[in-house]
Amino acid sequence: MLVTFSTDAYADTIMFGDVALAMLKMMGHSATVPGAILAADVPEALRRLKTAIDVKKALPAKGVDWSGVSLAHRAMPLIDLLAAAAKAEVEVMWN
């Protein structure tokens, strides 16, 4: 499964389902697809995701999957999307 994150302020970001669902949980949302974050809630979702990624980075090398790509690197496009949405004060959707 692929999950596409979209907002009016940034290009769509597509992620593998397992990674996307994990990041949704880190943002404090259920792993329900499709879904959305209201514009007013985007800054908090961004803060939660960044905090969770920082915690994962502080742990031993378990944060690297079989491909050698860390969760922190996988989160970068979503963090950029959320930051752009927060700045533009627009909602984020995924499906």
Image (tube, rainbow, N blue to C red):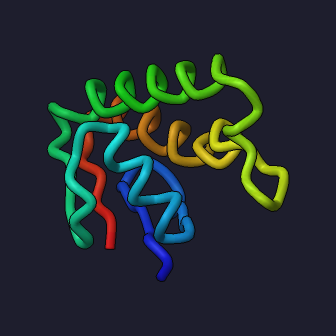
Q: Residue at x 45, y 20 (%)?
A: 51
In the picture shown, does residue 48 fall above or below 24?
A: above
Identified at 44% across, 69% down, the residue is 4
* Picture quadrant where residue 86 is located: top left
Is residue 87 shown to the viewer in this render? no
- Relative side of 60 to 2, left or right: right
Residue 49 position in % (x across, y down): 42, 32
The count of marks equals 0
Seen from the viewer's position, the closer of residues 92 and 58 is 58
> Residue 1: image x %, image y %?
47, 82
Asked whether 1 or 90 is in front, the reply is 1
Residue 48's x, y, as percent? Answer: 35, 26
Relative to 93, does residue 59 appear above or below in the rendering?
Answer: above
Q: Residue at x 64, y 43 (%)?
A: 71
**Quadrant assignment for the C terminus:** bottom left
- Residue at the far right: name it: 68
Residue drawn at point x = 42 percent, y = 39 percent: 82
Q: Relative to residue 71, is residue 94 depicted above or below? A: below
Where residue 66 sits, quadrant-wise, is: bottom right
**18 left or right, relative to 94:** right
Answer yes or no: is residue 34 visible. Answer: yes
In this rendering, would 7 be left or right of 10?
A: left
Tell me: residue 40, above or below residue 51: below
Locate residue 36, reporting x and y percent.
20, 57
